[in-house]
Amino acid sequence: MLNIIWPVFIIISFLYAILFGSIEKLNNSIFESTTNTVNLCLTLIGNICLWNGIMNIANKTTFMKKMTKFFKPIINFLFPEIDKNSKLHEEISMNIIANILGLGNAATPLGIKAMKTMQKENQDKKVLTNTMAMFIVINTASIQFIPTTVIAIRSSLGSNNPTAIVFPVWVATVSAAIAGITATKIFIKISSKGKIKKCK
Amino acid sequence: MQIINFLSNIAMPLIVLIIIGYGIIEKNKVFDTFLDGAKEGLIIVLNIFPTLIGLFMAIGTLRSSGIIDLLTKIFTPILNLINFPSEIMPLALIRPISGSSSIAVATDIMNKYGVDSNLGIIAAVIMGSTETTLYTIAIYTEAVGIKNTRFVLAAALIADVVGIAVSVAICRI
């Protein structure tokens, strides 16, 4: 998609700049953009490496497994259709915890593993099951305890207090997750009603 | 507001302490484990760097040519009706589609209006509280070869809209 958007952005900017005489500004901005990116990435490298290192410790100890116990009731509520003691239950909670800890790199492979386990039990291999749908929606909601990338960007731009956004992020992300979960539960109810009608 | 600041300040040190403490209790070689993770971090940044260069350049031209100002002017009356800051609109539109582009757009907003300004904070909160929805859906469905995603996109976008609306609202308090 960026193969289309990217050239379009640049071409219309050039045309607009020629028409309205802002070509000098445009010229300067091209060179500024490279410096800006380098500056941003230099600070990002520091913060992302640090956080990735810390989170790797969480990943390699039983910290994550211990956390799954804590999340059991929530997972049971979200995924009523899966067995409480199954391997799938553990895979799903590991994925959600990795997301919460901001371990994007660990979360995706864990999530794909869980999807494959769910697909094995799926009767119609071309359609998402209710459990899969809920699982994906939760993953798109990105419930993250520490929004590391944003904090890194804020500190690279010289913020007085880069972590000041943490609490507002919690409120926003939890609201988004609740909205997504509620919507999914409602959609599941509506679609299951439709199926019963068809059977009659 | 003071409680919010306190919670925001203590969250990071506390979680670092708990994790490292945990590693020591379990006799993990914490520093070696840390180094492995940190190396991975280098690769992450290296991978997004070329994308960011390209996008920063494109967004830079859009802004310096005056097109973004023009678009903002056109949409301001509509966005004012729902009390939504028009400067944030480009970010809200691109956030579900592309992760690295939204980093570029958000950074641009923070740079232009100030990282600690109201708009800068709103942009940061949106980035922290939402995810690249379309990409996430694609990865998980393609991993198992499913084409029919039912209502997932609708539900995920509802979550995004609520997340963005709450981000704007909470920063106005």
Image (cartoon, coloured by chain):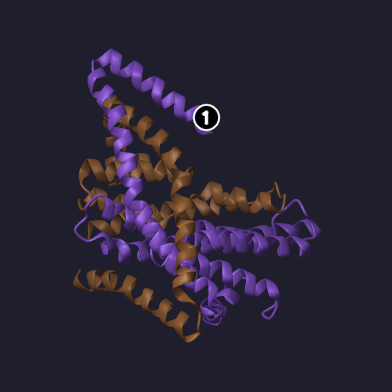
Chain colours: A purple, B brown
Amino acid found under the numbered disc labelled 1: Asn
A186 over B105 or under it: above or below: below
Residue at 67% of width from left, 61% of height from top?
A115
Instruction: Tell me: B97 left or right of A37.
Output: right
- Front residue of A30/A102: it is A30
Tell which subunit mark 1 falls on. A
Determine whether the residue tagged by mark 1 lies in a helix, strand or loop. helix
Label 1 Cα neighbours within 10 Å, binned few <14 / some 14-19 / many ≥20: few
B118 over A29 or under it: above or below: below
Res A143 seen here: no
Residue at 23% of width from left, 50% of height from top?
B115
The image quadrant that residue A162 belongs to is bottom left
The image quadrant that residue A190 belongs to is bottom right
B60 over B148 or under it: above or below: above
Instruction: Tell me: A72 left or right of B66.
Output: right
Res B133 seen here: yes
Residue at 45% of width from left, 65% of height from top?
B35
Q: In the rendered image, which quarter contains the C terminus of chain A?
A: bottom right
Q: Position of residue A181 (x, y in %)?
A: 53, 63
Q: Position of residue B91 (x, y in %)?
A: 37, 43
- Front residue of B14/B74: it is B14
Instruction: Tell me: A94 left or right of A11.
Output: right
Q: Position of residue B13 (x, y in %)?
A: 32, 73
